[in-house]
Amino acid sequence: MINPKRWRYQIIQYSLGAICILIIGKIFVYQTSPEAEAFRKGGDLNLTTLYPARGEIYDRNGNLLAGNKTVYEIGVDLNTIRQDNNSEAIALALSVNAGLDYAKIYNAITQADPSQNYTILADNVSAEAVDKVKAFKIELANKPGTLSASKLNGLAFKAHYQRFYPENALASNVLGFVTLDNNGYFGIEQEYNNLLAGIPSIVWIPVNPTRVEEVPVVKPGTTLILTLDREIQSAMENILDKTLSDSGAESGTIIVMDPKNGEILAMTSTPRINLNDYSTYSQVFPDSTPFNRAISQAYEPGSVLKILTLSTALDTGAVQPQTSFLDTGVIVVGGVALNNWDRGAWGQQDMLGCVQHSLNVCFAWIATQIGADNFYGYLKKFGLGHTTGIDLAGEGTGRLKLPGDSDWYPVDLGTNAFGQGISVTPIQMIMAASAIANGGNMVQPHLLYATVENGIQQNKHYEVVGNPISPQTAKTMNEMLATSLEKEASLATVPNYRVAGKTGTAQIPIFGGYDPSFTNASFIGWGPVDDPKFMVYIWLEKPKSSTWSSEVAAPIFKEVAEKLIVLMGIPPDQIRHQLAGQ
Amino acid sequence: MKTLKQLFQNYKQAAWRTQLQWIGLFLAFLVAIAIVLGFYVNITTRTALAGREIAYTQDDLITMQHKISDLESQIASLTSTQNMQERAAAMGFKPAGPEEFTYIVVSGYVPKTAIILAPKAVRNLTPIILPEYTESLFDWFAYRGHP
């Protein structure tokens, strides 16, 4: 018997069959769609490199010296562009809103290889420009009736970090800069590049959203806190710029260091560069211009080196402060006659007189009393002839000729004693002098105060790198150098504060002799003498207003010291002694 | 055998009834599969949504990190030395000289020290080699014997 209502079942049967066919058909359409093809081509996993943010750099008071800002890579999905045919619209939008070159953008899109899916149109585009483009894109998308060819479909923005220096050129000689490939050049940026850059992480991110996998947290680079004081740095740069303008010097350098622990409070030299525009590097530093003269450029320092000669003589017992010397205006060392700076004879002098009048003849005699072995042994102990180890890239060594070297002659013992025929960097001199100011303990100059990593601050401890002289010698030298400034009525003296220091006027070696017209003017000084808080090194190259350091560099020391007194809050000696007595 | 015979018998007598039973059974099976698939689709969708949510959150996190960096840089720019000096000058301030200072004694005054951006590292005083690794078997037995 045939069921009379069989047709009902047949309808259900055919309907189910049709639904099955529809489902299978739809699955087939999905699987063969261009989107599925693109998905398959992309693979199950996307290889992505996650770049950490570069570590920040702060000064000792927490002021940001180097940070990061967001910039964008602008690219296009070429498949979408080919579909919508909107390359002109994109080129125009980027040209108007982001200031990019229309032709360059248009060509980059239209001349892309047909096998390419994505192309980068521009990189390091500012956030402000990208915001404008994004707003315009949304405006077009929401505008009814806009043709696909006029929309900005396919335009993609990828944010990443770029180094940013909020202080522009401030401390540029110390900081160095970072190029677009996240590599540090010069200064702190190069020296601590590995710490600052962090470690990029390469991860596979599943395309399938159901395959959620933990994306590793990329640790940012280590943050550095420097010993620099932004206010002092700024003041020193202003003073140096004004000095160069007033004196007509070719270049200049100022270093301010805490002589007790070697912390560099300020370091500047010329020229300086706006670190946010490092592309001008080759114009600012033409030929072989050093990036930071304070550590890289060695020169004959002249009479500032006499403080090391006298320290050596006192420490070895070759002379005493009251040792007398008859200055006849000439001394023959190694068969060569050496004269004083004024070619005059200064008669009977004690050691204070010799240092006060900066008598070359007396110091050449002192060196002969010390003897070559002792003299050069002490200079090596003071750190001359090798780098100080300051944590900045590109430090120079200077040149300390030693007996036995092919270019050392017996006369060098005499000339080296007053700072000629020997080359040092400013940082070497300030490190050597720290032994005198700091009771015989020579400290290593450094810029890193602390690192901050994983939320933990690790402070760096300073190092005593040698004891070239005894505390007693250091005390005697401090007294002599302070008294010599006072007796000389030096332009370096600071009212109400006792400071110690020494000028240095050095001839500049040229091929076949010394430059007859120009000098290097230097000054090294520190204060207050009984409890030094700052040590300053000044070097002016080829000043034109005067060739004498006592006239051109000594007043700068006074100006620097007065600024430091204010910025560091150092009370006058009398008040300080009263307070100490309470 | 008897059951099989009965089935054939039934089929011959009223084939549609047996067919109906089979169709019912098949539909019940389909419904069961549909329910399982429904659960599967539901869970898969929720997982996908959660996955997307996590991806968006990660994107938000990165965006916020970028914003923080931008704001820090912006603040640093606005408070840069040059800007602050210009603002101070515009407000009528001028740099003080050493002679313009008056020093007074302030009991309990703590001089300015360098910045602390994060807690200092605490030295871990725990011995690197634990006693468990240094005690002898006899020590261990002794300890076990006299806790």
Image (cartoon, coloured by chain):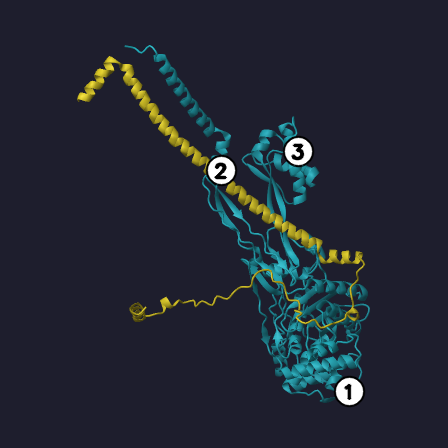
Residue A101 falls in image quadrant: top right
Q: Identify the colour of chain A in the image.
A: cyan
Residue under circle 3?
Answer: A139
Residue under circle 1?
Answer: A328
Q: Which amino acid does label 3 sit on?
A: Glu
Residue A372 against residue A3 in the figure, above or below: below
Disc 1 to disc 2, how far (Cα)?
Answer: 96 Å
Q: What residue type is labelled 1?
A: Thr
Residue B88 falls in image quadrant: bottom right
Disc 1 to disc 3, how far (Cα)?
Answer: 90 Å
The label on residue B49 is 2
The reply to whether residue A432 is visible in this rendering is yes
Q: What residue type is labelled 2?
A: Leu
Where's residue A446, x and y in %? 62, 67
Q: Do the residues labelled 2 and 3 touch (CB within 8 Å)?
A: no
Q: Which of marks 2 and 3 is in front?
A: 2
